[in-house]
Image (cartoon, helix red, strand yellow):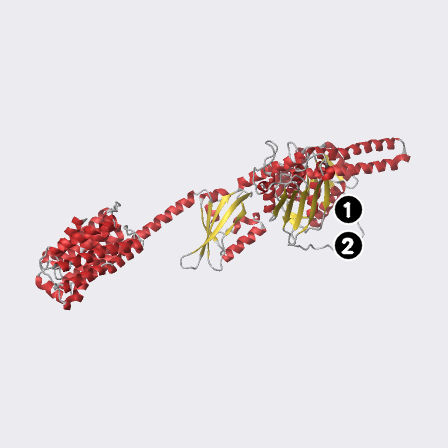
Amino acid sequence: MAIVYLASTWLGLTHAALVGTASPVWSSAGVALAGLYRLGLSRWPAIFVASLVVHLLPASLSPAAALAIAAGNTLEAVLGVWLLRRLGFSPELTRIQDVLVLTLTAATGTLASVLAGVLGLTLSGGGSWDSVALTAWGWWLGNALGVLVVGSALMWCSQHRPEPRGREALVLTLLTFGLCLGPLFSGNWTLARVSAQVLLLLPMGAWAAWRFGSRTAAYCVLLLVGVSLWSGISGPAPVLASAMEAGGVLKPRLFLVIVAFTGLLLMAARAERGMSSTQLEVLTTALRGVQEGVLVCEQFPGEAPRLVFANAAFLEMGGWRREELLGHSPFSLWGDALEPEAHQRLQEAVRSRRPFQGEVAMAHRDGSRVYTEMHLSFVRAAGGRGTFLVSTHRDLTAQKRLQAQLASAERIAAVGTLAAGVGHEINNPLAYLLLNLEGAMRSLKKGPEHVAEARARLEYVREGAERIRVIARDLKVFSRQEGEEREMLNVNEVVVPALRMAAHAVRARARLVEDFGSPPRVLGCEARLGQVLLNLLVNALQSIPEGNPEQHEVRVRTGSDALGRALVEVSDTGCGMAPHVLERIFEPFFTTKPSGEGTGLGLAICQQIVQSHGGELQVRSEQGKGSVFTLVLPAAEPSTEAKTPGLTSLVPVAPPRRRILIIDDEPRLAQSMRMLIEPSHDVVVTTRGAEAMAWVSAGQRFDLVLCDLQMPGTTGMDVYSHLRAHAPELLERLVFISGGAYTQATCDFVRSVRNRILEKPVRPDELLATIDEELATSSSSAA
């Protein structure tokens, strides 16, 4: 580095224009700055020694002046490197910020060399005080040009990133050489021609910087400045002398500083634009290839947001085509699938420009639901007029399906734990049902005088059948596979089926105490909340040892807390839990039971169900004294239902006889319904759906159809499709009867239709009331 600096300094002094020490372009300033920046500040002695030696060679400079100039040049380079590193300079000069930092360094760092050099020359007698200002001005311009032109070129030379542009670069090179070398051969030197030449160089530098990037721009600016100054300095002495006296040469040099600065700015602007385009292309490619769905919407003040971008993952997630989405409102994607609470939160986030995070349900193109975890952010557009809404969507549909399967398995496991007790609860009413049926038959055989006795026994039969129906209903509630449709629930009515299911098993180990209060109604899924309560009861009875039921207690209490929320508390006097167990009680797969006796998912699933209802599942326990689980649910919003005024003044009129079709693959059930309905209506019965469809196609007329939903061969869904195609007016008078064991296809069908579905076993009064209601509705519609 010392040799290079020595050579550049000697070259500069050879063509010095000011008192033998100030060159038009002091290239040594750029060499020192680039060298120390690249090699490290520890190389500053090389700069000092080389500068001192080369300035001691001329006999016109005293040692004191040479020492001052060498110290100033070294300090200039050291301060310049310190400024560059302090201000975050990048030697690639691909940012406007880098150009401004280099220009600031050229303008301020060079002052150290100017002050030290000019004062050293003047004080040692090498210059007059009258020319101090002119000398300092020329010195500063030469050093600044050296930093901007030579320094930037040397830094670029170390960057191995060529930027060729073929023929256009060749044309620019020929024009530049022609413009710069022309005056050298003309022989007609004037200051005006030198200045005009410099002015013509400006568009050439701008062209190089904008079209060819950093490396070509550096070489071009260096060539422009060097040749231009050479042509001015090597001209006839009278021209140079007169220019020096008037400071004329300094004006073109100042203009060259502006040319170099402009070229660097244009180059940096081009580089930044290229980097921005590259980054935009990279981000677009990344968004298209990312596995999560990405949606971008644009919204202007007073307008609804509209879709402007959707990546491939989002389109695949919803089954949409890009042209079907762009330009539409994002809220159309959710439709009725989005729950009201989530819809309100999302709209509030859009209005207030606040980030949104949560689970949302989106409507798939085929009508099904897609569950996603949505993250919504807002980006203000340039100019501040519009706003971009950027949302990412992680598909949770498969996860939701797996969670539902786990919850179902855990629910069936809980019911299975109580299977013996459930069997006992069914056997008891079944036993006296059979006994009373036998007794009723014997009473009837004895003659008319025993009819009252037979009627009493049949009443007991009815009560026993009702108890079995309730138990079957409870089993269906806890083993139901349908979705999680929410409805208004009385908490006490949710607790009772769980108590009936667990009562026999609990009483074998403890007293079962029911303490019902008046909790507010809640919005929830009966099957899921019933699963939570059943699981808590099973855990309570399993924590109590067998053998002393009179010493233990399981208490179920309902009511409300201080915030008006519904509360269900399940407490026991069992073994309790240690603190380290209590901390992990809701962790998935954590269990204290022996291997093979527990999955560790029960309480984790319960907590998830409760949280999905907006509630909390709390627990407190003390080892050896028992545990208390508290289920807290938010109260539902009060709603007012319109009351129909009583029509007590009207005289009831018997409905006219209608023709009813019964389709059920169980012959005895079909005949039983016929016997119940036939006194009031004409009834046609079939056990095959295909036969019923043939009757409809043949033109037979029916006022109402009672159809089993799940039958072998032709199902109730097939009958529905046939009626829609051949007798659409009968669709509204189609009532399904189901045993409740739904397949996935059946679940989707049930959610898609509005027809009433009666659950087996159907009470006679419920069946007759449904028939009357459906026939009355059809009559009013026809009217």
Look at label 2 and name its amino acid: Leu
* Residue carrying label 1: 655
Q: Nearer the viewer, residue 275 or 243?
A: 243
Could you tell me which secondary element the residue under label 1 belongs to? loop
In the image: residue 571, left or right of residue 146: right
The image shows a total of numbered marks equal to 2
In the displayed structure, would residue 356 be above or below residue 601? below
- Residue 418: where, in percent of width, then height? 68, 35
- Name the residue at the right extreme: 449
For residue 741, side relative to residue 238 (left or right): right
Along the line of sight, which residue is nearer the eye, 385 or 489?
489
Tag nearer the camera, 2 or 1: 2
Which of these two is toward me, 317 or 342? 342
Give the amino acid at mark 1: Pro
Compared to 264, does 438 lie above or below? above
Which label number is shown at residue 647? 2
Q: State the separation of the CA atoms marked 2 and 1.
A: 17 Å
What residue sits 44% from the left and 45% below the top?
Answer: 311
Residue 17 rendering spot, x and y as whole percentages: 13, 60
On the image, the x and y values in percent for residue 313 come to: 46, 43
